[in-house]
Image: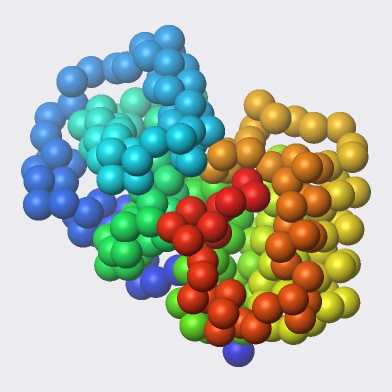
Amino acid sequence: MLRRSFTLGSLAGLTAAIAGLSPDARAQVSRPSGGIVDRATVRELRSIGASYRRSYKSFPASSLAHVAHDQVQLVISLRPKDQPAHLRDSLLAHMAEMAALASALLSLDLGDPGQADAYMDLGYQIAKEIDSQELAALILAGRAFRTCYGGDPAGGLDYALAAVDTAECGASMRMRAWTNAVASEMHACTGDHHGFRTCLEQARILLSGSMDDDRWGGIAWFDLSKADAYEGSNLVGSVALSDRVSVVGPRQAFRHS
């Protein structure tokens, strides 16, 4: 069965996902609310989060993972479900973005798949709760990298195609382009030259149109120059899959984003 219609992990609810992240998380969830957070504070948090995501390749992975974790815990302490609707969804989106960043760092850089999965499940649960195709697509694409370069290229392709399908349902244009580029890489890993070319061309078409970058929730960046880099490094048959998997460096999975 293809994973194009699946959910990540066993998602028993937002609180359960949070509780799996750290020993003190459950206590933070139970902590009394400190009151309503003002809109300017939420905007600043989102701006800070965007800077962290853009800086993915600029800081040591271990340091940035701690920062992402602290941001998740900070949002938990603000009790987003006690906030007005217009602030709640923005806080939860920030939390999901930081969870996605933490999962990428833990999985691809720090070799901690257990913690990475916990953050991935948390981010995906939040994305579904706030109906964010942007964040759901980001997390599915992240799972594609982890699955493929963990030795299951066919599974990685299924996750990538799920990311493409999800992005098409309402994500930003840049996210739609990036998920197609991820799918092109997964096609390359399975030896599907036609799929590789088709998805990469679709990514270029999307990048050539008008952008809505205020909605971009991805990690680092993706543009036409990055699409060219995908083509250069993922030509089918240029290197055996076993070699591709063995030489993937800590940040190689997001090297073009």
Residue 60 appearing in the image: yes
Query: Which quadrant holds the N terminus?
Result: bottom right
Would residue 8 appear left or right of 3 to someone viewing this image?
A: left
- Residue 100 in percent (x, y) is at 44, 49
> In the figure, residue 166 lies in which quadrant?
bottom right
Q: Residue placed at 80% from the left, 51% from the top? A: 228
Would residue 52 appear left or right of 206 to someone viewing this image?
A: left
Would residue 257 appear left or right of 108 to someone viewing this image?
A: right
- In the displayed structure, 96 sits above or below 240; it is above
- Residue 169 in percent (x, y) is at 73, 53
Q: Which of 139 and 255 is in front in this view?
A: 255
- Residue 86 in percent (x, y) is at 48, 25
- Residue 164 in percent (x, y) is at 71, 61
Residue 12 appearing in the image: no
Q: Residue placed at 82% from the left, 64% from the top? A: 199
Q: Which of 235 and 157 is in front in this view?
A: 235
Q: Residue placed at 28% from the left, 39% from the top? A: 63
> In the figure, residue 37 lies in which quadrant?
top left
